[in-house]
Amino acid sequence: MRIDILCLFPEMFASPLNQSIIKRAQEQGLVNIVIHDIRDYTHDKHHTVDDYPYGGGPGMVLKPEPIFEAAEAIKQQLGVSEMPIILLTPQGRLFSQSVAQELALHSHLMLICGHYEGLDERVCEHLATDEISIGDYVLSGGELAALVVVDAIVRLIPGVLGSQDSAGSDSHSNGLLEYPQYTRPQVYQGWSVPSVLLSGNHGEIAQWRRRQAILRTAKRRPDLLEKGNLCDEERKWMLENLLDPK
Ligand SMILES: C[S@@+](CC[C@H](N)C(=O)[O-])C[C@H]1O[C@@H](n2cnc3c(N)ncnc32)[C@H](O)[C@@H]1O
């Protein structure tokens, strides 16, 4: 997969893209992430990327020309006439694990990061094919939002995670939050690991994990339960244990 990111502050990507899973995925050739500075596509000596908003008001707006030129240059380099071009904006559709799964299927993605008051609306109307928000709050720029989107997508690319199972059981992957995890020591400050996890009985462990995932989703995010495909027996067990949480 190749991901091209257009932004005003390329340095913001240096550290996050050079650590841990994303770094390894790039070294293994599973993803190629290319950062482009929008200023490189300006033609005046001050490399102007923004201007005052028509109609007045506070702040500056990113000009359309450098962004359209950058996108065109990338498409030419890739030899494609169309590709998914995602604008990071607090006005976009809300990012989620299912949107990450959808985006991870593409071979090429372009992400555009806004700044200041945002971008000239013609970028949204005539260049972007999708608009994504990472949450109902406003960041100073799209760089952090792009990093969130890239991280969530890259870990879904086959081969990136050591075991494919680890993405499959993650919270939000099957609709539920993930079950509680424990590691050594078996007893810490008098708190023991649940005995079923030490039993070696894989069937009982799987059932305990499924039930714990259901219970914590019911307690913390009941709005998600519908996506968990609970059977009648699981629903009955959940109701009993929500009322009597021993
Ligand atoms: C200060 S914001 C502009 C907000 C814009 N004036 C508005 O009210 O919709 C600057 C840039 O940060 C990015 N941004 C801010 N919040 C975001 C969010 N929740 N999700 C994705 N991108 C965001 C966008 O790229 C945006 O163009």
Image (cartoon, helix red, strand yellow):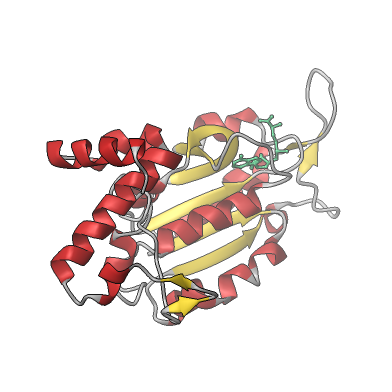
Answer left or right for 67 relative to 183.
right
Which image quarter has ligand 1?
top right
Q: Residue at x 37, y 50 (%)?
A: 177
Answer left or right for 87 relative to 38.
left
Depicted 89 relative to depicted 216: above or below = above
Answer left or right for 181 relative to 196.
right
Q: Residue at x 17, y 70 (%)?
A: 202
- Based on the displayed image, in which of its 4 quarters is residue 87 positioned? top right
Return the residue nearer the eye: 225 or 31. 225
Q: Residue at x 50, y 67 (%)?
A: 33
Q: Residue at x 71, y 66 (%)?
A: 11
Return the residue nearer the eye: 47 or 208. 208
Return the residue nearer the eye: 1 or 17. 17
Is there any visible trace of residue 72 in the rendered image?
Answer: no
**Residue 176: x %, y % from top left:** 33, 46
Depicted 202 relative to depicted 93: above or below = below
**Residue 223: x %, y % from top left:** 39, 32
Depicted 30 relative to depicted 2: above or below = below
Is there any visible trace of residue 36 in the rendered image?
Answer: yes
**Residue 162: x %, y % from top left:** 34, 77
Answer left or right for 202 relative to 134.
left
